[in-house]
């Protein structure tokens, strides 16, 4: 059974296959993040940045200066 047979079984004509379907577009919802999650991600990013900076200073030998 091919696509044409399925459409004919549903009572659709061949012309219906070539017509465009109507698509409704909806406005996307804004992304909302709880305050606790936002604060946690900011603190985590700061901590990772600080650890990276200390690690780079340690590896280059400038931490003792």
Image (spheres, rainbow, N blue to C red):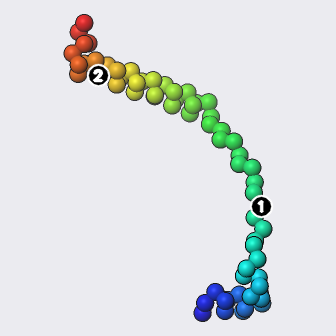
Task: Name the residue at 34% across, 25% down.
Answer: 52
Asked if residue 1 can be seen in this view, the reply is: yes
- Residue 5 lies, with reference to residue 21, above or below; the image says below
Quarter placement of the N terminus: bottom right
What residue sits right under mark 1 in the picture?
Answer: 24
Near mark 1 (Cα within 10 A), the count class, few <14, some 14-19 or many ≥20, is few
Q: Earlier in the sequence, mark 1 or mark 2?
A: 1
Query: Which picture quadrant has residue 30?
Result: top right
Image mark for residue 48:
none
Task: Name the residue at 78% across, 68% down.
Answer: 22
- Residue 35 lies, with reference to residue 21, above or below; the image says above
Asked if residue 10 can be seen in this view, the reply is: no
Quarter placement of the C terminus: top left
* Tag 1 and tag 2, C-beta contact below 8 Å: no
Image mark for residue 56:
2
Residue 29 horizontal/vertical position (percent): 71, 46
Left/right of residue 19 with respect to residue 39 in the rendered view: right
Left/right of residue 13 with respect to residue 45 in the rendered view: right
SS state under label 1: loop
Task: Name the residue at 40% across, 24% down.
Answer: 49
SS state under label 2: helix
Of 20 and 43, nearer the camera is 20
Residue 58 horizontal/vertical position (percent): 25, 18
Near mark 2 (Cα within 10 A), the count class, few <14, some 14-19 or many ≥20, is few
Query: Which picture quadrant has residue 47?
Result: top left
Residue 62 horizontal/vertical position (percent): 25, 13
Structural distance between the alpha carbons of marks 1 and 2? 53 Å
């Amino acid at each position: 059974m091919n696509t044409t047979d399925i459409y004919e079984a549903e009572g659709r004509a061949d012309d219906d296959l070539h017509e465009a379907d109507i698509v409704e577009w909806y406005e996307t919802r804004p992304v909302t993040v709880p305050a606790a999650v936002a604060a946690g991600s900011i603190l985590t990013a700061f901590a990772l940045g600080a650890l990276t900076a200390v690690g780079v200073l340690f590896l280059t030998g400038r931490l003792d200066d």
